[in-house]
Amino acid sequence: MKKLKDLFFGTRRRALVSGIACFALVSAGDFLVRNEISIDVFYFLPIFILTWRGGLRLGMATAVASVFVWLLDERVFVPELAAQVNVIIWNAVVRLAFFAVVVVLIDRLRELVYRERAASGLKSLMIHTVSHEFNNALTGLSAGLFLLKETDLSAGEKTRGEIYTAMQAAQRKLSLYVKNILNEARMEEGRFRIERSPILLRDLVAGAAGSLGELLRQKDLTLNTEIPAQPLLVNVDGEAMALVISNLIGNAVKYTGSGGRIDVRIAREPGGTVSFSVEDSGIGIAPENIEKITSGFFRTEEGKAQADGFGLGLRIANDLLALHGGRLRIESEKGKGSRFSFELPEHSPAPAGPAGRP
């Protein structure tokens, strides 16, 4: 049984060769038995194998070939049917339609099975990654608590302050992971709802930069901000947009080497929109991977070597921006840094009414 399974469903090449051989065998049988025994049903076997391992096009080609063989069989072995052209054509059309439906159903089933396998693999990867990252953060917190407990108060506020700062950074990192995972689950289930209110983007940038201050110092990174003096308001969900900006700036910090630079810019654009961008001098992204990194749980080999993570932050940012009517733009070149940006409509406060009116 195992050998038969390996023959038909082992490697893709072996399965395709087996499917073609099976088709040839069934076709030969069709000619040998002539019209005495209908063996049309046996064409399902090569159709199934070639569709499952070769895809929709090869499956359809096999269906057409099966009908052609049947037509040839009818023409050669049952010449008296030649005069009944309408009957032959009708039977051929029915067979082709039936085989085509079968091919489509098999291809759809194949897609669902492969998708379920991929989802299962992603879930396993996610559990492994989440466990690893949470363990790292909790280890840092535990070590900090131990040091605070064991450190003599006479050691000075500087030493204890450094320990506290490290613990605070671990706590913020853990909090960001939790928010990303919870929001991803809510969006997949359709339970995520945004509550808009006027927000200053510069305040969100200041909050994100403040939470990453210690990591910026550790990596000797320069964070430059270009923010207009005039306040620019956007009507967004404050918590969701804070997560977007934290993910984008945090992503730049993670994948930029020591001594690098990160530029954050907010500007008013023509057409009544406000733009936000973060540009870094980090490892960059190859063109073929730009779309993949917003799909979730995808990380390049260079990214894995540079920093830990889930590969979930950019997907969350992209999905949250979509809920606000925006879109994440990515410009990058491998080894030459990246630029992430988006635009949102500017919120203009309603003019105050005449005195005495609400």
Image (tube, rainbow, N blue to C red):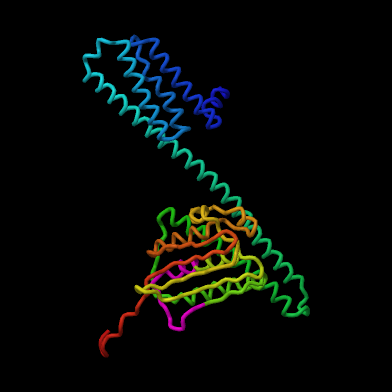
Q: Is residue 225 magenta?
A: no
Q: Position of residue 346 (x, y in %)?
A: 37, 74
Q: Nearer the viewer, residue 119 or 41?
A: 41
Q: Residue at x 30, y 83 (%)?
A: 351
Where is residue 75, by image quadrant?
top left
Q: Position of residue 7 (x, y in %)?
A: 54, 25
Residue 114 lies left or right of residue 127; in this view the side is left
Relative to 137, residue 44 above or below: above
Q: Residue at x 43, y 28 (%)?
A: 48
Quarter of the figure with the N terminus: top right
Q: Nearer the viewer, residue 205 or 292?
A: 292
Q: Position of residue 115 (x, y in %)?
A: 47, 42
Q: Residue at x 31, y 24 (%)?
A: 95
Q: Position of residue 276 (x, y in %)?
A: 46, 71
Q: Residue at x 58, y 49 (%)?
A: 125
Residue numbers of the magenta segment: 226-244
Q: Is residue 232 magenta?
A: yes
Q: Residue furthest bottom?
A: 355
Relative to 338, residue 65 above or below: above
